[in-house]
Image (cartoon, rainbow, N blue to C red):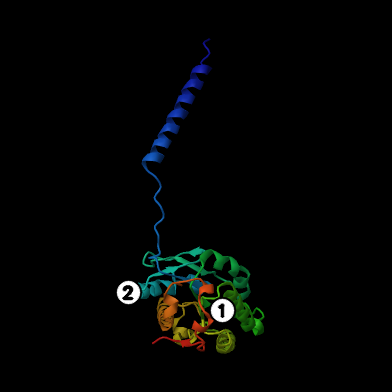
Amino acid sequence: MRNNAPRRAQALLGFVLFALTAALMALFQSPAAAAPAESNGGVRIMPLGDSITDGFNVPGGYRVNLWQHLASGGYAVDFVGSQFNGPPELGDHDHQGHSGWRIDQLRSNIDGWLAASDPRTIMLQIGTNDVNQNYDVANAPARLSGLIDRILQQKPQVQLFVATITPESSPDLEARVRTFNAALPGIVNSKGPQVHLVDMYSALTVADLADGVHPNAGGYAKMAGVWYNALRSVPASLVPLAAPAQDTPDDERSSAPAELATAS
């Protein structure tokens, strides 16, 4: 009986070589497309917070309408952060919102995020999960104060907007929300001219909530308007830094008190 093993091996080798050649030809003829650049080359803005920043219930959350406001207003911005989500109408999907996270969890990671993203402006809203998880609520304002301090230590020229947290439908949770928010003006006013309080609580009602905690589409749209007006109220927040921090003389830095930015 004739031994066909060498012939089979030769045929198998030929098939493998053919498949490899075809794959290489396809690779060179159809190179992978580069990911499109979402930024239009403007100021680096970090949306920072929890699931409301991420956009729970409504993908992209307030970031969708905020991006559209900024684009139609002629502002060139680059949303930055390690997270990425949202619909096509959101022109830049990067953010730093983490569902379920508390103040202490942001604090544990903030150094790396700031180093990687190098934001000029930060929009911070955090504390809802401290309230909802009943996590040492009495000391939540102090934790927020520490987070703000760390951000300013790492990025001394940043423009930092700190928003009050939004209402909740549960009476018990709502009482905690109000207590937490009441501490924010004093904290923000103690941090210097680059930290700005944003009154987000007053812009929404429980009718703007999808589930008693997270905004619905209308609520997120209201938030976008508040953020947009807050950013525009501090023109420096929408302009990239022109020079390193050490090149800015101390006597040229503003000493005005922190302002409260609200929706018009």
- Asked whether residue 167 appears in the rendered view, the answer is no
Relative side of 5 to 225, left or right: right
In the image shown, does 134 or 170 lie closer to the viewer? Answer: 134
In the image shown, does 216 or 147 lie closer to the viewer? Answer: 147
> Contact (CB < 8 A) between labels 2 and 1?
no
x%, y% of residue 66?
40, 75
On residue 28, which mark appears? none
Residue that extends furthest to the top in the rendered view of this protein = 1
Q: Residues within 10 Å of mark 2 (few under 14, many from 20)?
A: few
Identified by mark 1, the residue type is: Thr
Instruction: Specify the quadrant of the image occupied by residue 239.
Output: bottom left
Q: Residues within 10 Å of mark 1 (few under 14, many from 20)?
A: many
Identified by mark 2, the residue type is: Ser
Helix, strand or loop status at disc 1: helix
Name above or below for residue 257 compared with residue 152: below
Helix, strand or loop status at disc 2: helix
Instruction: Specify the quadrant of the image occupied by residue 111.
Output: bottom right
x%, y% of residue 182?
57, 89
Residue at (48%, 21%) from the top-left corner?
Answer: 10
x%, y% of residue 44?
45, 69
Q: Is label 2 or label 1 in front?
A: 2
Residue at numbered disc 1: 128
* On-image quarter of the C terminus: bottom left
x%, y% of residue 58?
44, 71
> How many marks are shown on the rendered structure?
2
Name above or below for residue 11 compared with residue 264: above
* Marked residue nearer the N-terminal end (2 or 1): 2
Relative side of 121 to 69, left or right: right
Tell me the CA gap for discs 2 and 1.
31 Å
Instruction: Specify the quadrant of the image occupied by residue 31.
Output: top left
Residue at numbered disc 2: 72
